[in-house]
Image (cartoon, coloured by chain):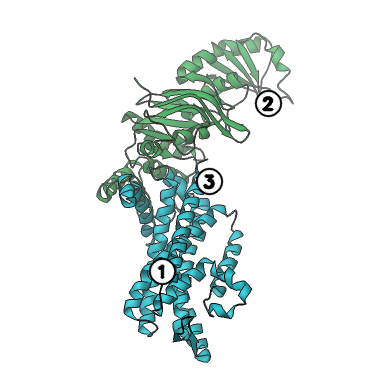
Chain colours: A cyan, B green
Amino acid sequence: MVTRLLVSSGMGRRSVSVTERNVATLRSAYWIVMVSGFLEPVLYLFSIGVGVGGLIGDITLPGGEVVGYAAFVAPAMLAASAMTGALSETTFNFFGKMKFMRLYEGILATPVRPIEIALGELLWAMVRGALYSAAFLVIMVVLDLTTWPRALAMFPATILVGFAFGALGMTVSTLIRSWQDFDLIASGQFALFLFSGTFVPLAAYPAVLRWLVEITPLYRSVHLIRALSTGTAGWPQLLDVLYLLALLTVGLTIAGRRMSRLLCK
Amino acid sequence: MASLIRARGLIKRFGDFTAVDGIDVDVRRGEAFGFLGPNGAGKSSTMRMIGCVSPPSGGVLEILGLDPVRDGPAIRAKLGVCPQLDNLDIELTVRENLTTYARFFGIARKVARRRADELLEFVQLTERADSKVEPLSGGMKRRLTIARALVNEPEIVLLDEPTTGLDPQARHLVWERLFRLKQQGVTLVLTTHYMDEAEQLCDRLVVMDGGRIAAEGSPRELIERYSTREVVELRFNAESQEPYASKLEGVGERLEVLPDRVLLYVADGDEAVAEVHRRSLSPASVLVRRSSLEDVFLRLTGRTLVE
């Protein structure tokens, strides 16, 4: 139904045309930005997962399964990189295009609507994120941190994580006043990265903080992907999926509305 | 014939500020229609409403018989927009700026490439096709923006201050291209605060001031209606030109005192100059010229267009 609506109204095609514009920019120096996005989680995996992991030994999962520390951290790095990729594209790049390049003013003079720009940019963030995820999953399998079938299950999950954070990032972008606000975003992002059950199991946090961690989007993402990676997925992961879908829908709706208000005065 | 653009009592408000205050406009197919007025007259706000990127605050607006709020995408598919500030894509090359833009209209890639080549030829940028946008001169950027506005073969082209900020040579090149478009039957709607631009390009125009329309007609009609055939500009070597007003009483039909000169509105310039000398006045400089839209604007608003 939704697909048919997208196609018949031209919404899908117009959104994709915005994505195409970004593909065209790849011929410029933009690819450097993309390479750096791939390297970051890999560096974390090796330094902390493999390096520090050697000192820590094994971790016991909530269900009782025991895994090596690298196998515990790797899915979290995967989730975090899906988040980082989506956020960098939808905050920093998106804001720059909207405010400084005046790119969207030009696009809005065509039949493309604000919500379609948002969708197109989000789709682009996902293409980029999917490439990172695929590369990282290959590394995980090669290092024997997960198996091929599990990696295949994790791939769509990382896409969902990316979409949800992309929509969130876009909403945040429409609220940003100046470049200084990016420091706030970076701090928030780093806090999420450190305290979302990424490096230690949830049980290690004080009880009062646990519920706070549990409602953060990155925790839900890590929770989902780690379960898939270690083969322990069950009903609780359905909650993660619903949480991320809700974030995606709400984020995209608000972003589209705010963009209309900012650009179509 | 039905109007391509029809506005009745059109209003645009931003908070307490009324930028466009109830204007009536009809633009007919194939004509070049201008909004002439100083900065802040409400021209750009009007253009943005016509471009369907700014919802009207009141009144009626129809473009190609459609409602800009409800049918925005359908209308924009048939418009070409050249904004006041260039918003070209600096991450793409000159040619890619056209081909990518064509995709926003759903034009097939192959058609887009062919059209881009034709348009680059038209705006004389073929040699810069693979260059980035940034190193282009202001005139080249503006021509590229005009080419971009034509990529969807629009029925109406909207040009907001098409030559503001360009040097004289670049301006003439832009005018010449726009004139060519007009000859091809494209409907042009432009805003300007240059009277010479309005005179060169517009078949019909409205003079805007403070969000309202002060007058409407062809440049010639407006000049005939609101000014005399000739104007004598006198500059006196004095602190103020004001004292000369009374001494020049009755020389022309009307006179205007500006900070640096006195304008005499007359039917015959040479005759008037002779009269000035008969009154033993000796201005430092004397210039006799034809009336222009600048004079119309001065008459209508008591102010000059470009301060």
Which residue lies most toward the left here? B110
Circle 2 chain? B
Could you say where residue A75 lies in the image, as x and y percent from the top left?
44, 77
Q: Is residue B99 visible?
A: no
Q: Is residue B154 left or right of residue A197?
A: left
Residue at image position (61%, 75%) is A207
Residue at image position (47%, 73%) is A223
Could you say where residue A62 lies in the image, as x and y percent from the top left?
49, 80
The circle on residue B154 is none
A185, A144: nearer the viewer: A144
Could you say where residue A115 lies in the image, as x and y percent from the top left?
43, 49
- Disc 1 secondary structure class: helix
Q: Which residue is mark 3?
A: A262
* Badge 1 or badge 3: first in the primary sequence: 1
Q: Which residue is mark 1?
A: A158
Q: Is residue A74 visible?
A: yes
